[in-house]
Amino acid sequence: MPIIKGRRMSLPVIQGGMGICVSLGGLAGSVAACGGMGVISSANTGFREKDFWQNPLRANLQCLRDEIKKALRLAAGRGLVGVNIMVATTQYPQAVQTAAEAGADAIICGAGLPLDLPGLVANVQNQDVLLAPIVSSGKAVRTICRRWDRSFGRVPDFVVIEGSEAGGHLGFKREELLNGEAKPLRQLMQDVLTELQPFEAKYNCRIPIYVAGGVFSGQDVADYIQAGADGVQIATRFIATHECDASPEYKRIMLEAKPEDVQIVQSPVGMPGRALKSPLLERLAALGRIAPERCSRCISSCQPASTPYCITQALIEAVQGNWEKGLFFCGSNVGRVRKMLHVDELLDELCREWRLIL
């Protein structure tokens, strides 16, 4: 039974955060209710609000609060409810504080190094919230741990190690991904474990690690646990669940995807990512740029006048099932996802497989 800083989960599975609005309170709460960690993506949770484009901060933070409450209600005291928050977003500090104040069990941050994360929750009432970075190298986790140690007198409560087979934004160079030169996940895991050792010794604690990127089956879960991980993070497989918060059309598109439909893309966030080949990406390849029609000021580094396309609009179109205009992030194994399941059925399948091995 996984334990993170005294908090217990009955399953060694974190459901990865997926935005925009693919994993909200419905999916996260259902995963937590089964004993895992369900994760809400904080990315533009409020896009359906009438004033979203005029006041995205208000819309997003209010909807984030509502989705956390929904997930906690569904979980009913079982498992853990986390929130995934991108460091690269303009609303990163406010989203962190809102998630903690709303009672989230964990905050998981990627798309940049969350060097200041502990400071952002220093004055919130929920001091039990677990804090975790997503990293893709030993160097990244060392940098984070050094900063947290020196500035805040603490270390991460757990770490998510994301390999090159994951979906969405990736912490690797585009050339590494295209040329197959990215380090294998097992090697990344060993690098991170090595870097964590001196901090574990200093704080007399063990920092759990969860691996992500290409994890598909119970066999994968068992293999990584045997190799030293505490558990895994899985995202793409949860899209094909009835409880996933995305539209039915979005799920259908993912179910019909083939392995050859997946490609590496460049995101306006400044990172490469993995997504389905789609009409939007074909138009971008032909035109070079699709000028944004409007801006929600979502990414700190984005320059609307020169950005190749609006990632917020593209992801909103995707989650609503618009194949022509959407950007469909996915993991490398999306072509293996062939049927819809309920969350409890998916987790039962994974657990039966890994328990037979372990």
Image: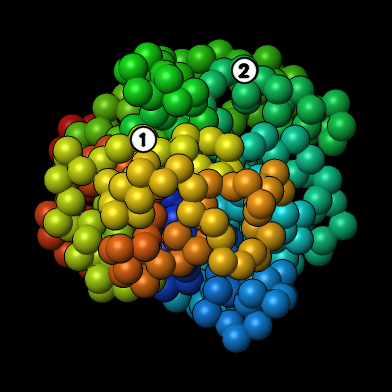
Q: Quadrant of the N terminus?
A: top left
Q: If you read the primary sequence from the N terminus, does the residue marked by circle 1 or circle 2 appear first? A: 2
Q: Quick check: 107 above or below 316?
A: above
Q: Position of residue 285 (x, y in %)?
A: 37, 41
- Marks 1/2: CA–CA distance: 24 Å
Residue found 48% across the figure and 71% down from its top: 25
Mark 2 Cα-neighbour bin, 10 Å: few <14, some 14–19, many ≥20:
few
Which three-letter amino acid code belongs to the residue tagged 2?
Lys
Residue found 36% across the figure and 35% down from its top: 264
Taking the image as shown, residue 350 lies to the left or right of residue 243, namely: left
Taking the image as shown, residue 353 lies to the left or right of residue 331, namely: left
Q: Position of residue 76 (x, y in %)?
A: 48, 74
Circle 2 is placed at which residue position? 139
Taking the image as shown, residue 269 lies to the left or right of residue 124, namely: left
Circle 1 is placed at which residue position? 264
Which three-letter amino acid code belongs to the residue tagged 1?
Ile
In the rendered structure, find residue 37 and report the number of the disc placed on it.
none
Residue found 17% across the figure and 58% down from its top: 255
Q: How many marks?
A: 2
Q: Nearer the viewer, residue 188 or 203?
A: 188
Secondary element under disc 2, as helix, strand or loop, is helix
Secondary element under disc 1, as helix, strand or loop, is strand
